[in-house]
Amino acid sequence: MAKCGITNISGGGAASSDDCTATKNKVLMGYTAITKDSNDEVNEGTIPTLGGNAFGGADETAFDTSPIVGAANNNAVGAFDYPLHGYFDNDAVRVHIPNLLPNNIKAGVKVGGKKASLTGTFTSDANAQSSQILTGRSAYVNGVKVNGTMPIQNAETDGDRVWATTASNWAGTFNVGVRNGYYLNGVNWVRYDVPTYRPENIKKGVNIGGVIGTWEGWVPQPTDLYYRGNNIANLSLNYYGVGKATFESGGIRVEKASSYLYTSTPFNFERYNYINIEIYFETKYSTVYNYRNYGVSAEIIPSKHTSQNRRTYITGGDNRSYTISIPLNGLSFTDTYRLEIGHAGEYYSSSDDDSGWYWSYEDRWIGWIYRIWVS
């Protein structure tokens, strides 16, 4: 039988592979021996001798399948399992761990022993505060866990609107106040109610923020009784004829009718000299066609003093503005009154016994009454 180990050790005796328990992978490279797997022959061992403080490239490939274990795994906190095969003839073994760098370690945390360690710098340049992180959320700021306190503002009205805190305007802009420090969730609009922001309060034709005005822009004076839709004296309206007369937003519209304005509130005639009426006369409306010198007629009739009525007539024509001033001189009492506004003129009568030109106050006309005031 062949000898186990090195032949002729101590000059005698021999052993075969069958007598050996060591295999080639239990013998250092560079050394020979008869082993259990050498078939009674002398072979070189296969255990490498690892010198210096670093592995070669071939050794580092084992890193791909080397796990890191944590506290739940045999209490080996932060341990790195690396398969090591060989004889170590050195003072230290260096294992290269990719990405083991300070900027990949939590700021302020030390990795390693007392002799040498790495102190993490990761997130050390972050500057968020709790008020800048949503409530119910958390984040690490410079390695420290921060719980958010920023409140969430959900929609308060109409599904996607939130109330404004205040509002103001300057230099042609409209500005609404919002809550500072809130995160708007599902909010598309900031709402601020302005009850007077309506077409009837904006000058006619002017577009303010998408609202087009309808207000004619006339402001009554203290002496006004009626002014373009503003019925200060609370006048009532009546008419007769085939048409009608109606209160409109910008004036009193007369259509083929004779118009009457009257009041139930007594009026002090003694205080004023005139009652004035501004109208736009489009045309007369009459079955008599041979008028001449026709124009606008206006009459004021005190209710209890009808004999002291006053009338004024102005010659003119169609499609023009008139201001009629009825004198109030001599009316020294307080009374309710009626205003009659229409047209008048001369018409020609060709009767056999009474031919000639005669005055007629027919009243029916087409146009507008814009203003009535005293002076």
Image (spheres, rainbow, N blue to C red):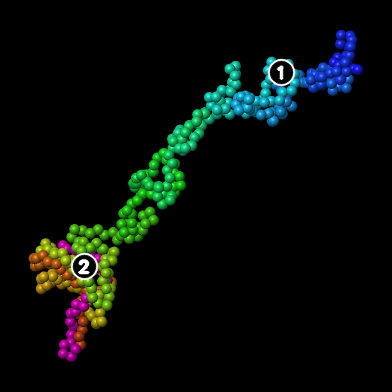
Is 25 or 271 nearer to us in this picture? Answer: 25
Task: Say whether residue 65 is magenta.
Answer: no
Residue type of the residue flagged with mark 1: Gly
Q: Where does residue 90 sit, x and y in percent of width and height? A: 71, 16
- Using the rendered view, name the quadrant where residue 340 is placed: bottom left
> Is residue 359 part of the magenta span, yes or no?
yes
For disc 2, the marked residue is 236
Q: Residue 89, relative to residue 238: is it above or below?
A: above
Residue 40, x across and y down, in percent: 88, 20
Q: Residue furthest front?
A: 19
Residues tagged 1 and 2 counted as in contact (Cβ below 8 A): no
- The residue that mark 1 highlights is 52
Q: Nearer the viewer, residue 248 or 299?
A: 248
Residue stretch rendered in magenta on the structure: 351-375
Secondary-structure class at tag 2: strand
For residue 28, which quarter of the picture?
top right
Q: Quadrant of the N terminus?
A: top right
Please indicate, yes or no, whether residue 345 appears anywhere in the rendered image.
Answer: no
Label 1, label 2: how far apart the Cα atoms are = 117 Å
Regarding mark 1 in the picture, which secondary structure is present there?
A: loop
Mark 2: give few (<14), some (14-19) or many (20+) Cα within 10 Å. few
Look at the picture and state if 282 lies above or below 155: below
